[in-house]
Image (cartoon, rainbow, N blue to C red):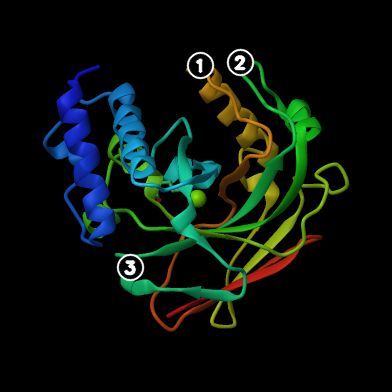
């Protein structure tokens, strides 16, 4: 690691303040160009600890940059992981207050809820499907704290992978009963189709994203506990939204969800 404990804590406070005060900041690698991946996740861990110490509940986990198109676009080899919070939960059919966000974008995702713990290394799609209670539609509202959504990946990992708000809704179904790989997703913004995709956009199969998360955590001696909600990453490109926009996402076999930006 290149950063000492005090610097990691200072950066976590800086990113938490940026989020809470809804102000954009310069990416942290500008001042810390030598920070490595362990530093980036250490800042994310410190950010999580700051939030939980003031009573925030962690409501789930997320994977990001799991679509091959987005990975290629951003020149990344490995997806990234982050956490979801209780203050980030929004209701299906409800509203998202844009005044508490900097420059939100939405991503249609497939969410998993586990019924058994999952632990890597060696976790694979079959183990994930056997350990899944149900899958359901998800919508992530990402909101990088970095100016103009411009960052490098270590900065974005430290910033909890741009996590801000999320919705789960539609219909929950057993993962065994549906073809998640070929599951079609259509995103509409203000009644116009803005993105279409299939489940295979996420690492070939969305369960692969959960397996990768289990393997990433396993490398740290951690696991995905039973009962965990996991957002597996955008099947669609991230779409910019603002006050007045309506987003509806239709999922084959899983119904639809919607959110209004106010
Ligand atoms: O959830 C995501 O895929 C976002 C990962 C971080 C990169 C971004 O903010 O686009
Ligand atoms: Mg996402």
Determine whether, in the image, residue 57 is placed left or right of residue 248.
left
Q: Find disc 1 in the rendering and name its residue.
A: 219
Residue 16 percent location from the top left of the image: 26, 48
Number of the front mark, 2 or 3: 3
Instruction: Work out whether residue 58 or residue 138 is closer to the camera in this orientation and state it.
Output: 58
Q: Residue at x 68, y 61 (%)?
A: 185
Please tell me which of labels 1 and 3 falls first in the chain: 3
Q: Residue at x 61, y 36 (%)?
A: 209
Distance from disc 1 to disc 3, alpha carbons, whole Å, reads 35 Å
Instruction: For the residues labelled 2 and 1, say whether their Cβ atoms are less than 8 Å apart.
Output: yes
Residue 2 seen from this side: yes
Instruction: For the residues labelled 2 and 3, say whether their Cβ atoms are less than 8 Å apart.
Output: no
* Residue that extends furthest to the left in the rendered view of this protein: 31
Instruction: Work out whether residue 11 or residue 179 is closer to the camera in this orientation and state it.
Output: 11
* Residue that extends furthest to the right in the rendered view of this protein: 177
Residue 155 percent location from the top left of the image: 28, 39
Number of the front mark, 1 or 3: 3
Q: Find disc 3 in the rendering and name its residue.
A: 100
Q: Tell me the tag on residue 85.
A: none
Q: Residue at x 34, y 46 (%)?
A: 54
In the depicted structure, whether residue 249 falls above or below residue 58 = below
Determine whether, in the image, residue 4 is placed left or right of residue 88.
left
Tell me the quadrant of the picture where the N terminus can be found.
Answer: top left
User: Mark 3 vs ligand 1: CB under 8 Å?
Assistant: no
Distance from disc 2 to disc 1, alpha carbons, whole Å, reads 7 Å
Residue 13 percent location from the top left of the image: 21, 42
The kind of secondary structure element at disc 2 is loop
Q: Find disc 2 in the rendering and name its residue.
A: 121
In the depicted structure, whether residue 128 falls above or below residue 257 = above
Determine whether, in the image, residue 15 is placed left or right of residue 121.
left
């Amino acid at each position: 690691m290149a950063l000492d404990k005090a610097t990691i804590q200072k950066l976590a406070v800086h990113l938490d303040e940026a989020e809470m005060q809804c102000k954009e900041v310069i990416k942290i690698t500008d001042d810390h160009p030598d920070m490595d991946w362990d530093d980036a996740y250490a800042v994310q861990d410190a950010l999580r600890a700051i939030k939980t110490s003031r009573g925030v509940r962690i409501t789930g986990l997320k994977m990001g940059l799991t679509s091959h198109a987005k990975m290629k676009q951003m020149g990344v080899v490995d997806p990234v992981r982050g956490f979801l919070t209780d203050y980030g939960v929004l209701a299906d059919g409800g509203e998202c207050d844009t005044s508490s966000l900097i420059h939100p974008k939405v991503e249609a995702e497939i969410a998993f809820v586990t019924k058994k713990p999952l632990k890597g290394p060696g976790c694979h799609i079959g183990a994930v499907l056997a350990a899944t209670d149900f899958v359901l539609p998800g919508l992530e509202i990402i909101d990088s704290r970095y100016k103009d959504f411009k960052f490098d990946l270590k900065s974005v990992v430290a910033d909890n992978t741009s996590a801000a708000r999320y919705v789960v809704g539609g219909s929950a179904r057993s993962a065994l009963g549906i073809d998640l790989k070929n599951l079609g997703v259509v995103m509409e913004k203000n009644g116009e189709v803005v993105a279409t995709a299939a489940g295979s956009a996420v690492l070939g199969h969305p369960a692969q994203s959960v397996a990768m998360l289990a393997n990433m955590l396993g490398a740290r001696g951690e696991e995905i506990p039973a009962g965990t909600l996991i957002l597996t990453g955008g099947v669609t490109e991230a779409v910019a939204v603002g006050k007045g926009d309506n987003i509806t996402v239709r999922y084959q076999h899983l119904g639809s969800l919607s959110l209004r930006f106010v």
